[in-house]
Image (cartoon, coloured by chain):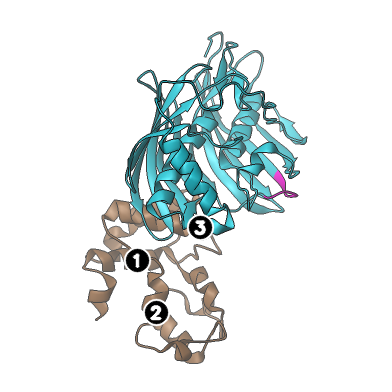
Chain colours: A cyan, B brown
Amino acid sequence: MVFHFVDQILELDPGRHALGIKHVTSGESFVRPNAGGRATLLSCIIGEALGQLGAWNVMAAKDFAVRPVAGVVGEVAISGEAAVGDSVLLDTTIDSVTDDAVFYHAAASVGGATVLRLENTLGPLLPMEQFNDPKEMRERFAGICHSGDSTGAPETGESTAPPFDLSFDEILSFESCKEAAAVRTLSGSEAFLKDHFPRKPVLPLSLLLESLLQLGQKLLEDGGSLYVPTGAQRVKMSRFVEPGDSLVVKVRVSERNAKNALLKFRSEVEGERVCVGQAEYRAVIGENR
Amino acid sequence: MNTDTIYPKVREIIADVLAFDVEEIQRDGSLVDDYSAESIDFLDLVYQLEREFKIKIPRGMIEQEARRGIGDEDFEEHGRLTEKGLEHLKEYLSEVPEDRFTPKMQVSLIPTLFTPETFCKIVLREMEGGGQAASD
């Protein structure tokens, strides 16, 4: 279980609403020290968990004939963190389901405080058979619907998964506070590809976005100033990134002042658009986030 | 009501969906050729229009409506428009500049013809009671 983030589904109103839990444990691939040194789950993985809960709901409502994939996220708003030991409450509301897409919004909270929201999110629905074994998905779904007391220990316990490497293979250009370009080739041996997806391994939008946000963060650093991402808007994934693809990422600073910054990003494979959007940051000079 | 009434809002939504400035969106521009719209953008656009105007736009509606009143065999042959099909399409997509239609064009390329005005017409039709009712 490398890339499944819903530990338990607490409530399910098929095709409409779901509540779930993600326990953050030490040793997870996607836990990192934050600016203050506290081990926290990558924000984009919280977003991924929300998307996965929405996906479970739609897949179950559609009898596992189709599954959603990443399409458009109108807004990601990051307002807090989930640290090791925290249980993240996932709340996903489906606004509409058609034959070809699901539209939803979602919020993740820790101890009653919202840590991340997704708004105006769209996922195209594609035939399940192309991505997963429907039988295996049904079994997994049954497992997380009946995994006992939500306050209990996470089902996977402590793991020793190697940390996910967010870095690029090469920085192609870098002009501090202006723009940067970097490339990463998906080798096919990345651990998350096993789950995302077994029959069609592709780079998850959440990880692409996390890499972009981190590249943007480096780009904004200048003379000791530090900016942290507070969200992203109109993030759109228009094609899959598969093993062997070289993903070129371009990030450009659109606005930057003492308090905030806005970045535009675009990524491509062989000149074809893969993902576009913008990201917002706030300055946290001398502050522990 | 006519499409002039809703165009400003439709234009704003198109600009937002395709990440352009509103001023850059021309009413007769090709969403695919001029603004690089891809299939995910059309999904997004239709959904945003549905939300804004509180309507339902049936998927594949444009092509279905363009085929109305003409048999499949008269409309296309081996995935390409027949002469009759082309004339039918031109009449249906009357807002699209004539020179963008090509003889024997592939049916799969019909979306490359769509303009902001095409979507204004769709929205208007749905606001006024739906495509089916309007043309039947």
Question: Viewer-proximal residue, A286 or A132?
Answer: A132
Label disc, if present, on residue B66 of the rendered structure:
2
Tell me the kind of residue under disc 1: Pro
Q: Is residue A133 visible?
A: yes
- Identity of the residue drawn at 56% across and 85% down: B103
Tell me the kind of residue under disc 2: Ala
Residue A274, image x, y percentages: 61, 49
Magenta-tinted stretch: A242-247
Residue of label 1? B58
Secondary structure of the residue carrying numbered label 2: helix
Left or right of A32 in this view: B40: left
Disc nearer the start of the sequence (1/2): 1
Residue of label 3? A126
Q: Are marks 2 and 3 in contact (CB under 8 Å)?
A: no
Distance Cα–Cα, label 1 vs label 2: 14 Å
User: For residue A227, what is the image quadrant?
Assistant: top right
Tell me the kind of residue under disc 3: Leu
